[in-house]
Image (spheres, grey):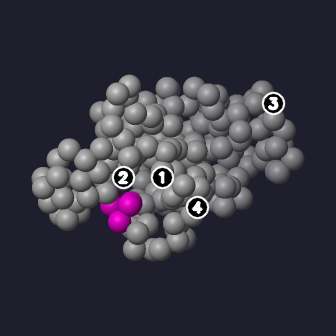
Amino acid sequence: MDDTVMRAMAKWPNVPNAYGWLALDARGRWLLKGERIGNAGVVEFIGRNYAPDDRGRWFFQNGPQRVFVTLEIAPWIYALDHAGHLVTHTGRRADGPSEAFIDDAGHVLLRTDVGIGAITDRDLPRLAQCFVDAGGRTPDDTVLMQWLERFETEMWLTLGARTLPVGRVGGATLATRFGFVADPRPDPGEPEC
């Protein structure tokens, strides 16, 4: 966290939390009351001060106040940089993909050293070239689309030196399975902004 944030937390320790104001969309964009935040400095500040609490609720520490984040898919949105490395929506490099999944909406999700995240849809065409079938062949678009619809055969995802089997995960169970809260709400009686 930024030093200014730490100082504000010490100076004003009892500021009510904010809920329902900030969201992270499927492309890794921050939304304030549904409107995209376009100021690069603000986006970077949010990214530097983004973390989970011990209950799996993700928040942005805005000075002394926690602004809880509504997650469209997952706590992290991954993109592929020019060299094919995974990078989070906050600019942090994500290494060591250990699991790969497809949810029922077709999102590709990866567990990395950073945590669970979804690949932004902008990178799906590049990522499609990383799938391999049981014979080690890259499926053409038709085969890949049929597989996504039916999920009847085995498929793997090759990222760097790792080849991961691709599992299926239901969107409704995603948060529970990976230990995060997609839509944080205040506890009964909790003051909020």
Tell whether 158 sits left or right of 187: right
Tell whether 98 sits left or right of 168: left
Ranked by sequence position, the earlier of labels 1 and 4 is 1
Q: Residue at x 26, y 58 (%)?
A: 63
Q: Residue at x 20, y 65 (%)?
A: 4
SS at badge 1: strand
Quickly name the residue at label 2.
Answer: 60
Quickly name the residue at label 1.
Answer: 22
Q: In the rendered structure, which segment of residues is drawn in magenta?
A: 45-49
Kindly report which numbered mark, 3 or 2, lies closer to the viewer in this rendering: 2
Measured Cα–Cα span from mark 2 to mark 4: 17 Å
Disc assigned to residue 5: none
Residue 144 image point, x, y percent: 79, 44
Q: Residue at x 39, y 37 (%)?
A: 57
Tell whether 23 sits left or right of 26: left
Measured Cα–Cα span from mark 1 to mark 4: 9 Å
Amino acid at pointer 4? Glu
Residue 135 visible to the viewer? no
Ranked by sequence position, the earlier of labels 3 and 2 is 2
Overall secondary structure of the magenta section: helix
Ranked by sequence position, the earlier of labels 4 and 3 is 4
Quickly name the residue at label 4.
Answer: 35
Residue 33 visible to the viewer? yes
